[in-house]
Image: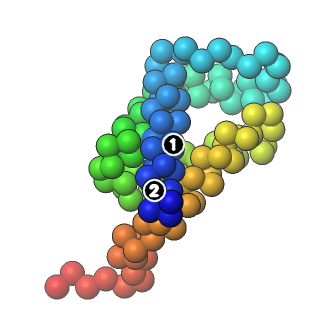
Amino acid sequence: MKRYLPVVARILLGLIFVIMGLNGFFYFIPAPKTPMPAEAIAFAVALEKSGYMNQLVSATQLITGILLLLNLFVPLALTVLAPVIVNIIAYHVFLDFNMIAPGIVVTILELYLAWVYRKTFLPMLTMKVSLD
């Protein structure tokens, strides 16, 4: 069982981000019934008005989700997803606490997979590097 847990976590995280990334382009997940707070609406409008941010985040989610599903460049995908997940949590903590549960789930999956792949991150954590 212990052998399969990282695979299940990787696939689950990959599926979540593929679905959410696709939803950013095709809008197939219905909007929540509860109204968003004014601050959250202002934030969403600002992202939309930027002309690129929603597409960038959706593409990032889609590409990293695919990488996780295909088991390709998993440490890189986890690294790229980290700031996306931080912003998901920050959005829910500061702007709209409703629906924070999925953010907590992806945070747990991300942290678990980062722990599983921790040895691959060690070279990035070297304080001083010689380019000899």
Specify few, some or many for label 2: CA neighbours under 10 Å numbering under 14, 14-19, or 20 or more: few
Q: Which mark is residue 12?
A: 1
Where does label 2 land, which residue? 4
Q: 99 and 44: which one is in front?
A: 99
Q: For residue 97, which quarter of the picture?
A: top right
Local SS, label 2? loop
Question: Disc 2 residue type?
Answer: Tyr
Residue 82 relative to residue 91: left or right: left
Q: Which mark is residue 41?
A: none
Query: Does any portion of residue 52 appear in the rendered image?
Result: no
Image point (51%, 50%), residue name: 9
Mark count:
2
Work out whether 58 lies above or below 26: below
Place of residue 72 in the rendered image (x, y in percent of width and height, measured from the top left): 30, 50
Place of residue 48 in the rendered image (x, y in percent of width and height, measured from the top left): 57, 22
Question: Disc 1 residue type?
Answer: Leu
